[in-house]
């Protein structure tokens, strides 16, 4: 980070800012409207979860670990249960694998729609925000019907799942998925063709393959820069190797491509859920 | 995979343990960690995942995890032990893998292990005026932060 | 009832304070703005500065790192100001009660008027809490 910045302006953002949902502190070094460097201070959300889990019963830790993040709330119990099941060499029943698939992918769907909405909100493009969150609501309704809560649903347990998906809920699931597919298709066309979004997102925040390697980035961020890694394909857990689906990648690594990857993954998620 | 690793790392390996087809643990002396990490990260192109630190009662254990995604999703973990609990230190790998600097700061502030050569060792998750010498993740510290 | 309290009853402006939360309650608050629950039809708007706010929606356990800032925000907010603690963490600390980063639930730091428990509380619960409060004001 260069300290000889006579022309650059330092803009401190946070910890409390109208944009941010959580307290975070960023020091942006800007020249005009272009951000050249960022200094980031974290830790405002640190809640001592690792230390707390040392003193809890093994089943309580699944609930604790869910509350690391409210948006991706199933991915942490999946990681925890997989780790313990690998250590103890337990294999979970087949129906549990499919249920974990369904819950995991429904969560991915709602999370990607949330991301898109927040991206629109931060750009000031509130239409995108309102529409994507409206189409996210049916997915939260499915969660409520199957599990009892909209977000922290505690479906996982070491060795399997906590609750079954009843047969009478499946028609509702299918109907909602069909509707969501159509709406996500509409959103994809609207977002990808939109000149405002293209102007603001293309070429911004580019991560090269070298950067991804040096910083160990994974997930849609790595896939947007053209690196084909997805833990669900490379080291499958739950039932991902029992269903057909493909990994979506893009070339440029800018924010626009990250949006494209996420929207594409929504369709793949719907495919996985239908097969499960 | 085990044989390729044996060939590349040679006499740096103190012990190699294959738990199952996807997890291999290699114990290395702490002074060799940079050379071993360079071989796995640069020559064999393993993907850096994260570093974990454990407080065993008589020593500290650091595990550097690397993944070979396209070769069956194998995770190779380099294990080192730090026996000096009064002044634990180890060489920093930030010049090799820039992304490792954040986790080294976190391990420093929560377990107290000093990383020699780290460009910017300061508080990451805890307050800047956190009590000196109070490392929350050490076993002797209770859950609420008191000794 | 004096004019300040009377003015509070219509069109509340809310400001969202997060003292280290898992974000779920924050997303449920944003959900209130979306077309399904839509509190904007009641005139409630999310504002960007605590100085414009009538209501402070507080979530999260208070982290030792953001402790002073939360106090500062409460002092900056124009009085009378209603403080609402949303979620199990804000009411009592939730699952993180015993950790080393906990600086006390909200009522140890600023005076709280309304508690909405739940993890996360449903948007319907939040709306019903605000309606009950407005009835009480009468």
Image (cartoon, coloured by chain):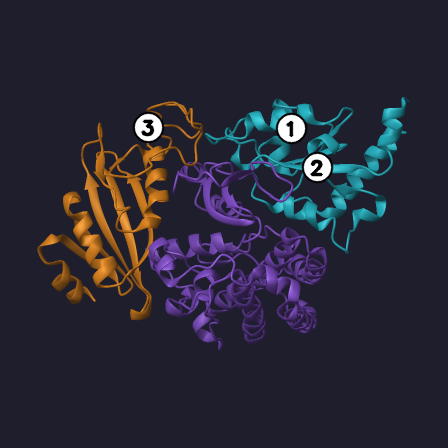
Chain colours: A purple, B orange, C cyan
Q: Position of residue A58 (x, y in %)?
A: 43, 45
Q: Quadrant of residue B115?
A: top left
- Other residues around mark 2 within 10 Å, as few (<14) / some (14–19) / many (≥20): many
Residue highlighted by disc 2: C15
Please name whichever residue, A3 or B119, is drawn nearer the observer in this view of the structure.
Answer: A3
What is the chain identity of the residue bearing mark 3?
A: B
Can the viewer see residue A27?
no
Q: Residue at x 75, y 43 (%)?
A: C125
Question: How far apart are the two marked residues, 3 and 1, measured between alpha carbons?
Answer: 36 Å
Question: How far apart are the two marked residues, 1 and 2, measured between alpha carbons?
Answer: 10 Å
What is the chain identity of the residue bearing mark 2?
A: C
Q: Quadrant of residue A199?
A: bottom right
Residue highlighted by disc 1: C73
Q: Is residue A110 left or right of residue A229?
A: right
Q: Residue at x 43, y 52 (%)?
A: A80
Q: Is residue B25 left or right of residue A101?
A: left
């Amino acid at each position: 980070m260069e300290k000889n910045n006579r022309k650059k302006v330092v803009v401190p953002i946070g910890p409390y800012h109208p944009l941010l949902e959580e307290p975070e502190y960023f020091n942006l070094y800007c020249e005009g409207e272009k951000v050249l460097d960022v200094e980031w201070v974290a830790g405002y959300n640190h809640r001592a979860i690792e230390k707390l889990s040392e003193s809890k019963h093994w089943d309580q830790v699944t609930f604790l670990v869910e509350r690391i993040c409210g948006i991706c709330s199933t991915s942490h119990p999946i990681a925890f249960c997989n780790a313990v099941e690998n250590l103890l060499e337990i294999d979970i029943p087949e129906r549990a694998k499919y249920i974990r698939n369904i819950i995991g992918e429904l969560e991915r769907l709602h999370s990607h729609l949330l991301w898109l909405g927040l991206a629109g909100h931060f750009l000031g493009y509130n239409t995108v925000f309102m529409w994507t969150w409206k189409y996210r609501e049916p997915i939260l309704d499915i969660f409520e019907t199957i599990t009892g809560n909209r977000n922290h649903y505690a479906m996982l347990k070491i060795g399997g799942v906590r609750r079954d998906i009843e047969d009478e809920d499946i028609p509702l699931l299918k109907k909602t998925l069909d509707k969501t597919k159509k709406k996500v298709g509409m959103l994809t066309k609207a977002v990808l063709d939109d000149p405002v979004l293209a102007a603001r997102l293309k070429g911004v925040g580019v991560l090269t393959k070298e950067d991804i390697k040096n910083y160990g980035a994974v997930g849609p961020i790595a896939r947007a820069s053209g690196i084909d890694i997805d833990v669900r394909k490379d080291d499958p857990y739950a039932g991902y190797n029992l269903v057909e689906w493909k990994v979506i990648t893009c070339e440029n690594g800018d924010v626009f491509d990250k949006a494209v990857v996420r929207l594409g993954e929504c369709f793949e998620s719907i495919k996985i859920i239908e097969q499960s | 995979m085990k044989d390729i690793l044996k060939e590349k790392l040679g006499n740096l390996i103190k012990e190699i343990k294959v738990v199952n087809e996807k997890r291999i643990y290699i114990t290395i002396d702490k002074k060799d960690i940079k050379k071993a990490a360079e071989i796995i990260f640069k020559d064999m192109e393993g993907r850096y995942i994260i570093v974990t630190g454990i407080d065993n009662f008589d020593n500290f254990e650091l595990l550097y995890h690397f993944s070979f995604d396209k070769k069956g999703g194998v995770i190779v973990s380099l294990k080192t032990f730090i026996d000096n609990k009064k002044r634990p230190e180890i060489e920093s790998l930030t010049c090799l893998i820039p992304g490792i600097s954040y986790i080294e700061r976190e391990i420093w502030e929560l377990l107290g292990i000093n990383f020699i050569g780290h460009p910017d060792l300061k508080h990451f998750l805890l307050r800047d005026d956190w009590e000196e010498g109070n490392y929350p993740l050490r076993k002797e510290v209770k859950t609420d932060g008191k000794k | 009832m004096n004019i300040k309290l009377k003015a509070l009853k219509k069109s509340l402006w809310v400001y969202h304070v997060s003292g280290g939360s898992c974000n779920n309650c924050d997303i449920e608050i944003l959900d209130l703005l979306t077309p399904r629950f839509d509190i904007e039809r009641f005139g409630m708007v999310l504002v960007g500065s605590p100085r414009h706010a009538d209501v402070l929606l507080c979530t999260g356990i208070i982290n030792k790192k953001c402790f002073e800032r939360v106090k500062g925000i409460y002092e900056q907010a124009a009085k009378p100001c209603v403080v609402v603690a949303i979620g199990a963490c804000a009411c009592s600390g939730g699952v993180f009660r015993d950790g080393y980063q906990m600086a006390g639930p909200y009522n140890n730091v600023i005076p709280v008027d309304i508690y909405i428990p739940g993890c996360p509380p449903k948007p319907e619960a939040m709306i019903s809490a605000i309606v009950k409060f407005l009835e009480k004001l009468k």
